[in-house]
């Protein structure tokens, strides 16, 4: 074993799923004691590659070397044995167990559990101090905020002896302040000689924290770069294969009449847990109102109440001077008819029927419109022609109106849903997570379409957990925490720090009072 050998080296790794060649002759070298970023569009193959390294998949061909030694990684156990740990985007934790119980699960330390627990507690305290990963080992994991749960995952990997740590989209559920703290932890890991591989689509984070970056496109590795010698724009172009506009170009908004007015809105779920608490908002024509917040703070319920899917417990929603709460019009179907479009957060659950063809999905919710009907039967030709027009205008690929929805990538599924809702020319458009799982080139397109609708005088509400997205496309931003609106500011006055504090529950007026005092 050479001391100069890379921490991790891949040589000509290939992986196919049927006709799809997900990884094609991938070679990669990761320096010891470095933070190495891997970027690429959705479907570029980066997650498949890391799943091979961690043993979820077995490569069809190729070799993997850890610190110069060839390793046959057949499953996660062999990967852990080789000193590789992985923190998944969706945490692998048991919410009802303590931190300590989660960390030793599967490696309890022999017949006498108490002895294993005592030894584990001592080792965890050492790891916490060494890597600035402080967390109460006796806390119930389900009671911890998401940032601390992520620390538990990192501790779990380190406890199992990880020298190479893979993090998959680690900041997707963090506030900016939690993300900054994570970066400080990664810095400490690097200083202590650990090697970190960071999979992310956030180019700003790549530039801020990594030493080197590798770019994947369509299953191939297209570039290996020193981070200090590249830029966000250059990385985006390598990912997509063309120049990409990273910032939305738009004129200042010209807000007009309030089309939706929300007052004192409350919603209790089936377990009588309050999910929305006294929500007050106005959605105005010619303006994009962005809702920011860490996932799970009431944004989903707000969208579904406004879309007529959930019934509020109390409060008022006025749509173009018509009171909706308690009226017969307050159903998703009727709201569509009076001018409200809705792009749901989860396109698979509520936006598409994956077994339906693209042309069938293109009219979901609007199938009773006269132009799609001929007597007692659907006008199939008109439906297909409409879908073909959507496909052309929104650059849906492949351009096949007969392909089932499941056959499209996530980004193209999203374009299909957006086309269906936007092309009805609604007065108000609700959009949940507009670019979730969407390629960087498609993100640019979707943002531009939303700005065009705004400029045409439409009222748009956008919910996104991506703080950069909200700051980029919104004209006004409201922040939700624990079911409440904790602050509302003009986008021109927003900073990541200011929004991040609100996302953590610090009310805007409380922050101002503290600053004044």
Image (cartoon, grey):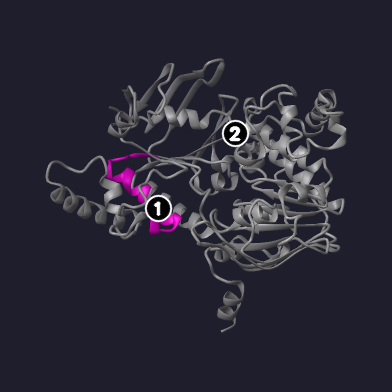
* For residue 313, above or below residue 237: below
Q: Which quadrant of the structure image shows residue 348?
A: top right
Q: What residue sits 14% from the left and 51% below the top?
A: 114
Please give the range of residues in magenta.
142-165
Mark sitting on residue 493: none
Of labels 1 and 2, earlier in sequence is 2
Mark sitting on residue 42: 2
Image coordinates of residue 108 in percent, x first then y, are: 20, 43
Q: What residue sits 38% from the left and 52% below the top?
A: 151
Mark sitting on residue 149: 1
Principal SS element in the magenta part? helix
Q: Is residue 175 magenta?
A: no
Q: Answer left or right for 423 relative to 17.
A: right
Residue farthest along the front direction in this orientation: 376
Q: How crowded is mark 1: few (under 14 residues within 10 Å), some or many (20 or more)?
A: many
Q: Residues within 10 Å of mark 2 (few under 14, many from 20)?
A: many
């Amino acid at each position: 074993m050479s001391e100069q050998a890379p921490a991790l080296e891949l040589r000509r790794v290939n992986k196919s799923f049927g006709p799809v060649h997900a990884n094609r002759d991938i070679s990669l070298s990761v320096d010891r004691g470095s933070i190495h970023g891997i970027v690429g569009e959705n479907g570029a193959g980066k997650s498949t590659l890391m799943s091979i390294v961690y043993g979820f998949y077995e490569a069809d061909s190729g070799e993997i070397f850890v610190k110069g030694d060839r390793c046959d990684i057949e499953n996660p156990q062999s990967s852990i044995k080789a000193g590789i740990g992985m923190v998944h985007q969706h945490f692998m934790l048991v919410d009802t167990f303590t931190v300590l119980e989660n960390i030793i699960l599967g490696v309890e330390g022999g017949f006498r559990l108490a002895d294993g627990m005592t030894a584990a507690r001592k080792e965890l305290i050492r790891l916490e101090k060494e890597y600035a990963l402080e967390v109460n080992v006796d806390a119930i994991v389900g009671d911890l905020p998401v940032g601390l749960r992520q620390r538990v995952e990192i501790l779990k990997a380190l406890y199992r002896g990880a020298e190479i740590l893979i993090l998959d989209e680690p900041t997707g559920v963090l506030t900016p302040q939690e993300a900054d703290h994570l970066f400080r932890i990664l810095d400490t890991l690097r200083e202590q000689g650990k090697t970190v591989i960071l999979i992310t689509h956030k180019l700003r984070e790549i530039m801020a924290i990594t030493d080197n970056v590798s770019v994947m496109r369509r299953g191939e590795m297209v570039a290996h770069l020193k981070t200090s010698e590249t830029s966000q724009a250059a990385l985006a172009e390598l990912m997509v294969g063309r120049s990409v506009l990273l910032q939305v170009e738009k004129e200042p908004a010209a807000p007009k009449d309030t089309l939706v007015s929300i007052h004192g809105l409350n919603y209790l779920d089936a377990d009588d847990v309050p999910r929305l608490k006294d929500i007050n908002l106005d959605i105005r024509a010619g303006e994009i109102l962005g809702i920011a917040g860490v996932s799970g703070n009431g944004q989903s319920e707000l969208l579904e109440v406004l879309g007529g899917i959930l019934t509020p417990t109390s409060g008022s929603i006025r749509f173009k001077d018509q009171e909706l709460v308690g009226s017969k019009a307050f159903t998703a179907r009727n709201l569509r008819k009076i001018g409200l479009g809705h792009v749901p957060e989860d396109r698979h659950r509520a936006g598409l029927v994956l077994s339906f063809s693209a042309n069938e999905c293109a009219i979901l919710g609007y199938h009773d419109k006269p132009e799609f009907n001929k007597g007692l039967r659907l006008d199939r030709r008109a439906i297909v022609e409409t879908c073909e027009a959507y496909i052309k205008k929104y650059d849906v690929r492949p351009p096949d109106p007969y392909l089932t929805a499941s056959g499209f990538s996530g980004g193209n599924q999203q374009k299909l849903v957006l086309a269906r809702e936007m092309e009805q020319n609604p007065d108000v458009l609700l959009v949940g997570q507009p670019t979730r799982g969407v390629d960087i080139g498609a993100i640019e397109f979707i943002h531009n379409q939303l700005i065009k609708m705004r400029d045409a005088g439409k009222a748009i509400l956008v919910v996104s957990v991506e703080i950069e997205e909200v700051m980029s496309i919104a004209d006004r931003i409201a922040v939700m925490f624990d079911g409440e609106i904790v602050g509302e500011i003009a986008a021109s006055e927003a900073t990541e720090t200011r929004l991040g504090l609100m996302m953590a529950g610090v009310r805007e007026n409380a922050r101002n009072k503290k600053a004044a005092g």
